[in-house]
Amino acid sequence: MSSSESPLSLFFGTSNGLNHRVRETEGELVENFSSIPVGHPSSNRDSSANDPVQRTEAHDNSSLLPRLTDINTRKALTIAICVVLYFLFLSSLSFRKDYQIVQTLSPSDQHLKDFENDPSLVNALSKERKEIDVYHDEKDKANFTELFRSITSIPWENLQPPSSDIKYIKNVSYSIILSSVVKFLRDKKNHTNDNEHNTTFPPDLSPSAITDVLSSRSQNQLYSLVSNIIQHHNDVPYHSVHHIFHVLISSNKMLHMILQQDQNEASDLAKSVQKNSFLHFVFIFSAFIHDLDHLGVSNKQLIDEDHPLAKKYSKDTSSIAEFHSISLAFEILVKEEYSHLVKEVFGENENSILGKFHESVKKFVLNTDITNEKRQESLKDSYMRLVNRDTSQDDEEKVFSPALELCLLVCDTASATQLNEIHLDWGGRLFEELKQANPDFESQMRMSWPELQISFYEKHVFNLLRDLEKLEVISSEDMNHLFFLAQESLDYWREKIKNNEK
């Protein structure tokens, strides 16, 4: 709009007529009546009372006065109405802008209530989450159940991420984490006791069902948290956001294997794990953050090169990358922008379980460092006590946690127990990452790549599977399937050696 145009021209076809009306309000109404004869009361010129012609014209024009008054009133009223409409228009633009921000941020149709209670939230979330791309219509917003159903229904052996699109990864990750949070809060709200177990699949993730236990404001913050964590992964061949997503969907699938067992056939340990939704939440969150901000190099290399992360964490642990992932994840979680979510999920003050959650996640993630022999021995001692049915500890989470910690180890290298094509894909990514981290990697290898793969299966993969079988947390049918898939890949590498191919 040019500087010469009035904003009111938005309400009219052209600006000329409007400008003329505005000028009239500035004391120039007389321009429209320049033909009024001398002698009219509105004229400042002298009149001749003896002039019969002028007297006649004055008499005829005397009726113009009330007409002029009516015209002035109508025009003033018209201008006043236009001004009011203009400001209403500006107000509507401002409201629509704020409403669109809410629409963009909210995965629920209950968002306006929270924003009315806390108007500052609009600007705060708008600033932090400019690029958030949550679903925009009711059909999509209610589709998290379908997303969760579709990813969980994929058979274990085919669990290669269906899409590398970041928006897809973000929305599926949110649906999985939301599912574990909602289940935990529902059990907490309903005070689920030891005799209750709900294996409903898929969980009800409709807006109304979610809002029953998690406010729309916390849903916004959870989606923002998932988006934020996803953005903190590096573009490396193996330990990228795609590896995190693969481990997350594999962990979700394994948890489903545990939950869907027939209650008449499930072991006592499986039933105990089934009922502990807090551990489910820890398990899923740990899978999601276990390699956060991974640099694509080993802990040994970080220490040997005196990397800043090694300087920061080496006094506490040799598991530098894992410790960094935990620290960064909780540094993000406790930011002010997620305070409402944290209070609603974990409680506050002396009733908060955030510390307990942190310690549990820390234990899960640190145990994914398979090069730390001392920690691996400690983990094995813990879950072997479960195999021997030694559950004398008072803390239920500590008793049954090792079972899911072992499951996370299996899921961290899930491709080893999936179709060989998937295993080869992820093996190729790992090989590229090792070469990027150390250009001399191939020349320094003490054995061929097929030999390394065979050693990995024999000394790590099958040992994990045998221990998982002893725990009896998943069905014997599912265990046999995992063994079969792992054996297929191992046979592939043995055949490579036999044919002397590298």
Image: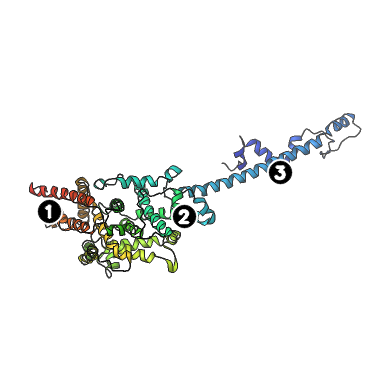
Instruction: Indicate the secondary structure of the residue bearing disc 1.
Output: helix
Q: Is disc 2 surrounded by few (<14), some (14 to 19) or many (20+) residues within 10 Å?
A: many
Residue that carries the numbered disc 2 in the rendered image: 215
Query: Which is nearer the eye, 19 or 78?
Result: 78
- Residue at the extreme right of the image, as rendered: 50
Instruction: Indicate the secondary structure of the residue bearing disc 2.
Output: loop
Residue name at image x 65 percent, y 39 percent:
19
Q: Alpha carbon of mark 1 to alpha carbon of mark 2: how far?
A: 53 Å
- Residue at the extreme bottom of the image, as rendered: 315
Residue that carries the numbered disc 3 in the rendered image: 26
Query: Which is nearer the eye, 176 or 112?
Result: 176
Residue name at image x 22 percent, y 48 percent:
418
Specify the label residue 451 is tagged with: 1
- Please tell me which of labels 1 and 3 falls first in the chain: 3
In which quarter of the view is residue 457 placed? bottom left
Residue 40, relative to residue 210: is it above or below?
Answer: above
Q: Looking at numbered disc 1 in the image, what kind of residue is underneath it?
A: Glu
Q: Looking at numbered disc 2 in the image, what kind of residue is underneath it?
A: Ser
Asked if one can make out residue 128 in the rendered structure from this viewpoint, the answer is no
Query: Which is nearer the eye, 243 or 473?
Result: 473
In which quarter of the view is residue 397 placed? bottom left
Residue 248, relative to residue 373: is it above or below?
Answer: above
- Please tell me which of labels 1 and 2 falls first in the chain: 2
Residue 14 location (% of width, % of height): 61, 35
Circles 3 and 2 in contact, beta carbons < 8 Å: no
Q: Looking at numbered disc 3 in the image, what kind of residue is underneath it?
A: Glu
Residue 147, relative to residue 185: is it above or below?
Answer: above
The mark lying in front, picked from 1 and 3, is 1
Instruction: Quadrant for the N terminus, please.
Output: top right
Residue 318 location (% of width, % of height): 24, 66
Q: Alpha carbon of mark 3 to alpha carbon of mark 2: how far?
A: 55 Å
Q: Is disc 1 surrounded by few (<14), some (14 to 19) or many (20+) residues within 10 Å?
A: some
